[in-house]
Amino acid sequence: MNDTTGVPDADHLRTSIQEQARLLTGPDVSDVVRVRVRRALHSAGDLLELSGAEPARDVAARTVAWLAESVGAFQRLPHGFAGGHAVEGEPAPLLRIVDELDLLGLTLDHAYDATRRGDDAALDRQLDVLRERYAVRTSPAAVVRTAVVPPTDVDQEVVADRGLEVGADGIPRVPVPDQPDAHHETQEPAR
């Protein structure tokens, strides 16, 4: 999935973009947000089609991670609150997310242009914008779904000593404790 830099490969990113598109552009999302999310996801996909190099993948991965966190958090807000509630001196959450998505779209356009021209310095500047303005708590690699790989070094003696079983997928199973008899009637203690 990852190369030595920890950035997901292009195929995993494409899959992640498709998954996030289903999650972040549903009917519960405001139209003004939905269209901007689609633009950002399409731009990230276009960037991957243009170049599978690490900087382009990093831009796409950070974009997907930020969208998953920020738009996901916005979706969890009550609709009336998101559209109309503003803290003094701050815009409503809807306006804030729209502004952020517009700037993200512009940043992705600049990243695409830099990649197309082969201007590594300009692409690095766009990556810096993403790192600073669109920082995420989740590692971009963590947003990409990975297959569960069975452990190859299961110590059979430890498995046997602990009374475990190992499934066909290589994952140890914990035995289910004996269940009480379903027809067992409890007796109340004598008084």
Image (tube, rainbow, N blue to C red):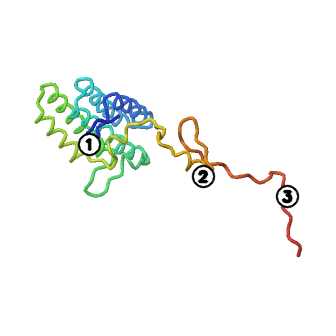
Say what secondary structure mark 2 lies in.
Answer: helix
> Is 89 or 142 nearer to us in this picture?
142
Instruction: Locate residue 36, reporting x and y percent.
Output: 30, 34
- In the picture, the disc for residue 161 is 2
Residue topped by disc 1: 100
Q: Which of the two marks, 2 or 3, is nearer to us in this view?
A: 2
Amino acid type assigned to the residue bearing label 2 in the image: Asp
Percent of width and height locating residue 145? 41, 36
Q: In the displayed image of the protein, which residue is found farthest to the bottom?
A: 191
Q: Find residue 119 and report its image quarter.
A: top left
The quarter of the rendered structure image containing the C terminus is: bottom right
Label at residue 185: 3
Question: The disc labelled 3 sits on which kind of residue?
Answer: Glu
Instruction: Report how many numbered discs are placed on residues in the image.
Output: 3
- In the picture, the disc for residue 157 is none
Of mark 1 and mark 3, the one earlier in the sequence is: 1
